[in-house]
Amino acid sequence: MGKNVGIVIVSHSPDVAKGAADMVRQMVGTNVPLAWCGGNPGGGLGTSVEAIVKALEQAWSDSGVVIMVDMGGAETNSEMAIEMMPEKRRAKIVVCNGPIVEGAVMAATESSSGATLDRVRRAAEELYSR
Amino acid sequence: MTSEPVKVGSVPRARSRAVLTHVGGLHARPSIKLTQLAKRFDAAVWIAVAEHGPWTDAKSIARVMAMKTPHMATLYFMAEGEGADDATGALARLVESDFPDDNVNGQ
């Protein structure tokens, strides 16, 4: 893989992140790079910059990666994770402003057809922009 | 299902229609399959629940889902551009074949 835009799902809850990823896999299929993370290192609710970096590496595609987040720290930690990525990759990662579950499914649907990073982002954000 | 090419000027256009027999109507999964198929074609593709529209971009997953099309509605497809006839034919077949899992191209 590596051609279609990747999707990373970041939630405070590992159950939410995994559940959203399951929906993507079952509804859209397997031709989209996908990774998820959630929870803090202590096992509670939260997000971790390291886990997000790992997920970004896992779902990496040369076409780019979109990150779907739930709230607050998920977004700021995602931005910190992007800063920790190699400079060449940073410009190809975007945090989307869309609902985490529906946004992930819609972004993946768009990506599965070989759409560009910008189009995938727009699909993820469409529900909030109308 | 009916499908017909319509030649207007030099731009290929086509229309088709099919009854949505899928139980539960056009919910998430069938909407995803439908938009994935529509995106395979270069032609612009629209979908409607009435013969004269209003028309919705069949390549937009958010818009197709928002139609909330119920079971047994008639779906109308319209395409314009390269491969218009193939697009409307394939979409009508997808609907009529009840959105099979392994056969998203409706052939």
Image: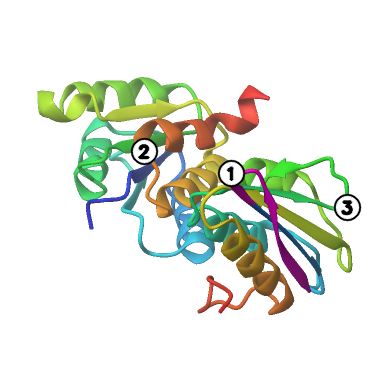
Q: Which residue is mark 2?
A: A116
Among the two numbered marks 1 and 2 on one chain, the one whose residue lies closer to the N terminus = 1
Q: Which residue is mark 3?
A: B51
Q: Which residues lie in the magenta part?
A: B1-12
Q: Dot 3: within a 10 Å radius of its alpha carbon, few (fewer than 14), some, or many (20 or more) residues?
A: some
Chain designation of label 2 = A
The residue shown at (54%, 30%) is A125
Q: Is residue A80 magenta?
A: no
Numbered tag placed on residue A75 in the rendering = none
Image depth: mark 1 or mark 3 in front: 3
Image depth: mark 2 or mark 3 in front: 3
The quarter of the image holding the C terminus of chain B is bottom right
Q: Is residue A74 above or below residue B62?
A: above
Q: Is residue A63 above or below residue B12?
A: above
- Report the side of B33 relative to A91 (left or right): right
**Is mark 2 in CB contact (under 8 Å) with mark 3?**
no
Mark 2 residue element: loop
The residue shown at (37%, 44%) is A7
